[in-house]
Image (tube, rainbow, N blue to C red):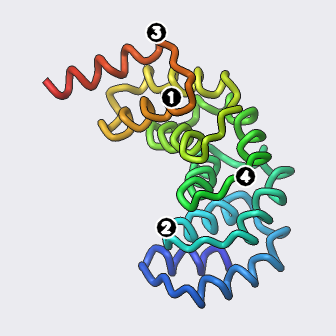
Amino acid sequence: AIANTVWAYATAGHNDPHLFDAIAQLALLKLNTFNSQEIANTMWAYATADHPSPALFFAISQLSLPKLNTFNSQELANTLWAFATLSHAAPEFFEAVSNLAVSKLHTFNPQELANTIWAYATVYHYSVNPQLTNGILWETTQKLESLEMEQIVNILWSIVVLNTINTESVVPLFSEISKRYY
């Protein structure tokens, strides 16, 4: 109920800081009962409302670690996106996801791929598992026609920021941009 409530307020654009602070306090008391969807929806709501809640985000980064294997691709990508959007570094969480997500990349849609690599770059998490960045690039090349231009550019920007440029992997992305632009 807490996650649905805060999600609904954020979706409706009702971003009252006092309300979000009160919900964060309540969520901290119940966080150990949240499932992966409730965690992801809560994180998404706070990021969408542009409402930092450091105590809540820290607690989520720690309490969600044992539950990570229950997160689907959307929940992983949205949670990473939320941390990055509010500039909340969560190195243990990012490291754990970096290792776990490799085996799930085939289930990520183009937006999830772009948001995931963007999140790592945005919080300057340079110790990202190289299998994750390589896997995202490979999956991206498999789904090129489904990617929006902004997603391609964000992926390329992220690869540069993370200094994980693999020339063979990025050529198809630049080719796609060229094909669409000209």
Check contact, mark 1 vs mark 4: CB within 8 A: no
Q: Label 1 is placed on what type of residue?
A: Ile
Describe the element under mark 1 as helix, strand or loop.
Answer: helix
Describe the element under mark 2 as helix, strand or loop.
Answer: helix
Question: Which mark is in front, 4 or 2?
Answer: 4
Q: Within 10 Å of the Cα at label 4, are there few (<14), some (14-19), or many (20+) other Cα atoms?
A: some
Give the residue number, with chain letter if any, for mark 3. 168
Instruction: State whether residue 71 appears in this view.
Output: yes
> Where in the figure is residue 122, as x and y percent of width and height?
54, 46
Which of the two discs, 4 and 2, labels the residue nearer the N terminus?
2
Label for residue 90? 4
Question: Which mark is in front, 1 or 3?
Answer: 1
Which of the two discs, 3 and 2, labels the residue nearer the N terminus?
2
Say above or below: 52 vs 103: below
Which of the two discs, 3 and 4, labels the residue nearer the N terminus?
4
> Where in the figure is residue 37, as x and y percent of width and height?
66, 60
Say above or below: 116 vs 139: below
Describe the element under mark 4 as helix, strand or loop.
Answer: loop
Q: Residue at x 46, y 9 (%)?
A: 168
C-alpha span from label 4 to label 2: 18 Å
C-alpha span from label 2 to label 1: 25 Å
Label for residue 48? 2
> Where in the figure is residue 164, as x and y percent of width and height?
57, 22
Q: Label 3 is placed on what type of residue?
A: Glu
Q: Residue at x 64, y 28 (%)?
A: 132
Give the residue number, with chain letter if any, for mark 1. 159
C-alpha span from label 3 to label 4: 31 Å
Which of the two discs, 1 and 3, labels the residue nearer the N terminus?
1
C-alpha span from label 1 to label 3: 13 Å
